[in-house]
Amino acid sequence: MTKGKTSVRVTILGDEYTLRSATSAEETQAIAKQVDHSIREIMQSGLVVETHKAAILACLRTAGELAQVQAEVMRLSEQMTALSQEIRPWLPPAKRYD
């Protein structure tokens, strides 16, 4: 069964947005708060004044973090597969799932 979408009001840089999301209202609020914080942090650095440019840099930062996490997930998945192959011979034949 698919989860229905809920409308959530969030505030980013003082502007309110109504988002429809399949995630919980709390999770959507937390994500919006993180986005707001990231944009404000970039703007407070003094290097960027325009909010749209700060938002783009915040998106790029988040995309970079996501790429790192995805690479780590892939690395861990490969390690788990290697370990699984290593211990498979120790298991009883019925549990090996060859």
Image: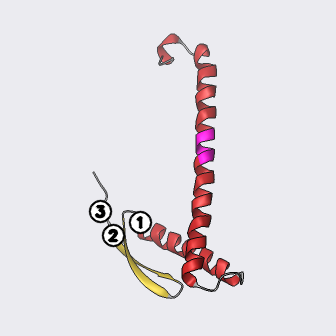
SS class of the residue under badge 2? Answer: strand
Type of residue at label 2?
A: Thr
Percent across and percent down for residue 25 are 42, 70
Percent across and percent down for residue 26 are 46, 70
Q: Which mark is residue 6?
A: 2
Q: Which mark is residue 94?
A: none
What crowding class fits label 1: few (fewer than 14 Cα within 10 Å), some (14-19), or many (20 or more)? Answer: few
Work out how far the residue at label 3 is from the one at label 2, CA to CA, in angstroms.
7 Å
Asked whether, in this view, residue 25 is left or right of residue 13, the answer is left
What crowding class fits label 3: few (fewer than 14 Cα within 10 Å), some (14-19), or many (20 or more)? Answer: few
Display coloring: secondary structure
Q: Residue at x 51, y 17 (%)?
A: 96
The secondary structure making up most of the magenta span is: helix
- In the orientation shown, which residue stands out farthest toward the left? 1
Q: Is 17 or 43 nearer to us in this picture?
A: 43
SS class of the residue under badge 1? Answer: loop
Q: State whether residue 6 is above or below residue 78.
A: below
What crowding class fits label 2: few (fewer than 14 Cα within 10 Å), some (14-19), or many (20 or more)? Answer: some
Work out how far the residue at label 1 is from the one at label 2, CA to CA, in angstroms.
8 Å
Type of residue at label 3?
A: Gly
Work out how far the residue at label 1 is from the one at label 3, CA to CA, in angstroms.
10 Å
Q: State whether residue 76 is above or below residue 18.
A: above
Image quarter of residue 3:
bottom left
Q: Which mark is residue 24?
A: 1
Q: Residue at x 61, y 59 (%)?
A: 64
Sequence-wise first label, 1 or 2: 2
Question: Contact (CB < 8 A) between labels 3 and 2?
Answer: yes
SS class of the residue under badge 3? Answer: loop
Q: State whether residue 31 is above or below residue 53.
A: above
Q: Residue at x 62, y 59 (%)?
A: 65
Q: Which mark is residue 4?
A: 3
Q: Which residues are magenta?
A: 71-75
